[in-house]
Amino acid sequence: MSVFLFPLLALAVAGVLLSRPLRSARGWRATVTPLASIIGSGFLVVAPVLGRLLGRYAILGMTGITLVALTVGAVMRFNIRHLEPLLERGALDPLGLWLERAANLALSLAYVISVAFYLRLLSAFALRPLVLEQGFWLDALTTLVLVFIGGIGWRRGLHALENLEEYSVSIKLAVIAALLAGLAVHDLHTGFDLSAVHAGVSDPWEIARVLAGLLLVVQGFETSRYLGAEYDAGLRVRSMRRAQWLSTTIYLAFLALVTPLLGGINGARVDETAVIDLAAAAAWILGPMLILAALMSQFSAAVADTVGAGGLVQEESRGRIHDRQAYPLIALLAIILVWSADLFEIVSLASRAFAFYYLLQTLLALRLAFGWRQRLGFGLVAALLAFVVLFGKAVG
């Protein structure tokens, strides 16, 4: 089978995703933002990390992570239906308002850090061929991209940013479709051989900590919560669920198909390039294609979190600050981070901030729950998220 069929497949999928009927559908537009954020940099690092952690059982770890994420997503959808109306009417009690404000503060911090982090990774990929992926040029390119995103958001608003997302997400999904096809062909030719795949970690506590940290790999569905200025609650609930199930299918299919290649990362340093080497082992052309997907994933995830942060500012200011006014401020704060901090060191802060946000949102849902079964379910989710906040080991 010619390896050049994979780029053709990617072009065909991109053509469908960028077709006018799909791009004009409000349901798809509302799905793009959470989907872009969920399938961000985590898609590149999750396979190598789980390969070293669980070996041939990596798919089980990914299944657990996505099930937890789907459960937390159900909590967020409950809050869209039942918490938002109370906030709009000003009927939430003081403790509930405090929890909501604290959650939004944690999320704001996490968004700014994640936007800067995503775009710094994008710049590193873009500059790697020129051997300029460190120092001044890395920070300068990251700053230019941030200025571009902030400027587009300020001048043209949410829908312009959504257009950027649609193109980048469509390209990313098209490359992922080709990647899955290439891995499937490789597995058929090699007989799905798992003999070289072994787990590198045997300590159950360490495994639990890393899996807890990896929950943040599938973070991003909460952005639907802050698109209320453009989409009604019912559409946001449906689009969040759609984005989560689509991303879950992609993650699980990818882990299942890439498992025979995970023996190649045993003992290696886990970073963004590890999965590109794995893809190239299946078919050389998939390596360059995955670099393109990496660039698109960082860009679309950064735009998605910028959109989410803008909606958050608009909600917190009760409409006094429009999201278009917030986008340049978010970009400015991210630029300050880029030039003043080592983002790889503080990304763990973003991970814990996201988990803390989910925990507070779950506590809010717990206070509004109907019946003991729902309260018990929300209570278990809150306990799990508290474990992530206290003990989750961030990777990225």
Image (spheres, helix red, strand yellow):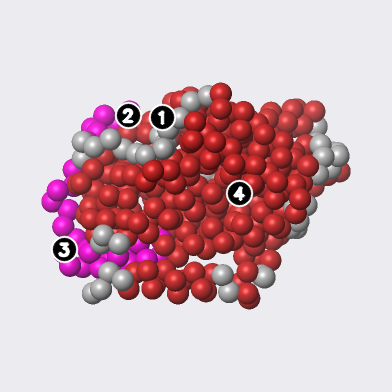
Mark in front: 3 vs 4: 4
Q: Which residue is mark 4?
A: 304
- What separation in Å lies between label 2 and label 4 (alpha carbons)? 31 Å
Graded by Cα atoms within 10 Å as few (under 14), some (14 to 19) or many (20 or more), the crowding at tag 3 reads few
For the point 30% across and 65% down, the residue is: 182
Q: Looking at the image, is mark 3 or mark 1 earlier in the sequence?
A: 3
Q: Which mark is residue 393?
A: 1
- What separation in Å lies between label 4 and label 1 (alpha carbons)? 24 Å
Is residue 53 or residue 307 the one in the foreground?
A: 307
Is label 3 in contact with label 4 (beta carbons under 8 Å)?
no
- What separation in Å lies between label 1 and label 2 (alpha carbons)? 9 Å
- What separation in Å lies between label 2 and label 3 (alpha carbons)? 32 Å
Q: Looking at the image, is mark 4 or mark 1 earlier in the sequence?
A: 4
Q: Which residue is mark 2?
A: 206
Q: Looking at the image, is mark 1 or mark 2 earlier in the sequence?
A: 2
Residue type beneath disc 4: Ala
> Is residue 191 positioned above or below 137 on the image?
below
Q: Which mark is residue 158?
A: none
Q: Which residue is mark 3?
A: 190
Residue type beneath disc 2: Glu
